[in-house]
Structure formats: structure tokens, C-alpha cells
Image (tube, rainbow, N blue to C red):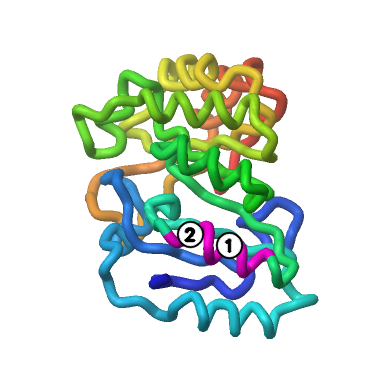
């Protein structure tokens, strides 16, 4: 497996655990506000392969609790499950970050017992999804299937939305709240403009706006919080 990035230690990516984060190239969305735009190409130059990753993890036993697989979109990798099996044998918990566009792959990898925690991005309300991810004709059917699976499935999870002023408003969060009603955890994340973001002119919402959005969605979920603001 080609690996396109590695954060050797993080206290933020896996709730309550010390983890490293593995970045995999390749994505089937084109979000204008993406922080990892350089990871869209699965065939971009890699920094290591899976054997080098396993060698690194062998040196981190007792120091790290978990490994996070993110992207891009990690579920595009056909060899993901094979690599995770090897990582689990080393004693690490596994978190998966996903855009939710591959419900069958998500279900298969969870029900094999390979994943301990899933973080799924809910990009926007259904009627604004295509605009928000840069694919105007996008169907949200598979997104809805992934939401339903996580809501009623066996794995710990969270939903999260990166909030961009140009794409989100109060109606966005009324619809998102209904879409994920009953969810255990939902996070609003503040957009941060970086050099790697592909489109200029995008901006974050104010703390006050974020608080307003939070009050709209909070009654629909068990726990709702703001991150990164």
C-alpha cells in the first residue's frame, strides 16, 4: 500500500487515545475547502509503504494506543482491510475517517471487527451536498446509507461537519440535524484557510454563528460540540 503522509503522534484524532495518523491518497469528492487537496491523486509519490508503516509501529508499542486511517478517502483502497489486519495484530486500536460514500465497504470492514471508531463527514444538508463537495450532480443516497448504518450499527462513531461561511447557513443545520437524528456525537469544525486549500475566498464562520448552528442541531443528537474555534 502507498502511504502519502504520517503524523507520528496526535492527541486530537482519536478521542481519549494517543494515536498516529496515516494519510492515504485518492478521493472521490472535490471539496473546494479541502485541507488535503494534494492527496486527491492515489498515484502521487508516496512517503512509505505498508511494510515501512508496520516497522514504524513496532517501535511505538506502548507509546501509541491507536492508528487513524484517513485520506483522501481511505475506503477507496482495496488493500485497506489487509493492512488494518496487520496493524491490529500489533495491538493497536483503529479509527477510520470516511466521507460516507462507500457504505458497503464501510459495513464490511466494521463487521469483520477491524474498526473501533468511525468519524464520518456530513458535508452539508442533502440539497446542498453536490455544491459543497464540488460535484453538482452528486446523489446523497450512499451518504444516507452510511448514516443509517452508523446510527444503528455496532461500532462507535461520530459525525462532523467542517463549517464554511460560503456553504453553510441555519437551514443547513436544520436539515443535518434531522438527517442524523439520534446520533451519539456530532461536531461542528471551524474551517481554517491554508495554502493547501484549492480555492481562494472561502472563510470561517464566527464563533457566534457557530454557536447558533450548534443550538439548532443539538436537540437532535446526544452530544454536540464545536471544534477548532
Give the residues drawn in magenta, as a range: 79-88
Residue 161 horizontal/vertical position (percent): 48, 36
Residue shown at the point (44%, 78%) measured from the top left: 49
Magenta segment, prevailing SS (helix, strand or loop): helix
Q: Is residue 198 left or right of residue 99?
A: left
In the depicted structure, whether residue 192 falls above or below residue 43 = above
Residue nearest the viewer, comparing 107 with 172 = 107
Residue 212 horizontal/vertical position (percent): 54, 23
Mark 1 element type: helix
Question: Tag on residue 84?
Answer: 1
Question: Tag on residue 80?
Answer: 2
In the depicted structure, whether residue 222 falls above or below residue 68 = above
In the depicted structure, whether residue 164 falls above or below residue 60 = above
Mark 2 element type: helix
Residue 64 horizontal/vertical position (percent): 72, 71
Location of the N terminus (image quadrant) = bottom left
Residue shown at the point (23%, 50%) measured from the top left: 200
Location of the C terminus (image quadrant) = top right
Residue shown at the point (48%, 59%) measured from the top left: 80
Amino acid at each position: 500500500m502507498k502511504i502519502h503522509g504520517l503524523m507520528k503522534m496526535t492527541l486530537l484524532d482519536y478521542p481519549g487515545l494517543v494515536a498516529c495518523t496515516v494519510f492515504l491518497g485518492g478521493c472521490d469528492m472535490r471539496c473546494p475547502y479541502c485541507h488535503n487537496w494534494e492527496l486527491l491523486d492515489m498515484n502521487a509519490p508516496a512517503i512509505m509503504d505498508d511494510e515501512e508503516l508496520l516497522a514504524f509501529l513496532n517501535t511505538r508499542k506502548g507509546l501509541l494506543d491507536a492508528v487513524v486511517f484517513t485520506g483522501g478517502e481511505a475506503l477507496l483502497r482495496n488493500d485497506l482491510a489487509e493492512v488494518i489486519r496487520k496493524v491490529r495484530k500489533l495491538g493497536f486500536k483503529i479509527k477510520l475517517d470516511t466521507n460516507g460514500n462507500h457504505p458497503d465497504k464501510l459495513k464490511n470492514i466494521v463487521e469483520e471487527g477491524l474498526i473501533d471508531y468511525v468519524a464520518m463527514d456530513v458535508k452539508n444538508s442533502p440539497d446542498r451536498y453536490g455544491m459543497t463537495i464540488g460535484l453538482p450532480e452528486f446523489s446523497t443516497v450512499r451518504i444516507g446509507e452510511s448514516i443509517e448504518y452508523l446510527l444503528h450499527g455496532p461500532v462507535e462513531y461520530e459525525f462532523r461537519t467542517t463549517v464554511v461561511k460560503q456553504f453553510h447557513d441555519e437551514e443547513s443545520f436544520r436539515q443535518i440535524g434531522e438527517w442524523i437524528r439520534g446520533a451519539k456525537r456530532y461536531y461542528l469544525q471551524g474551517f481554517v484557510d491554508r495554502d493547501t486549500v484549492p480555492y481562494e475566498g472561502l472563510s470561517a464562520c464566527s464563533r457566534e454563528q457557530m454557536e447558533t448552528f450548534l443550538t439548532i442541531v443539538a436537540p437532535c443528537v446526544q452530544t454536540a460540540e464545536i471544534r477548532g474555534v
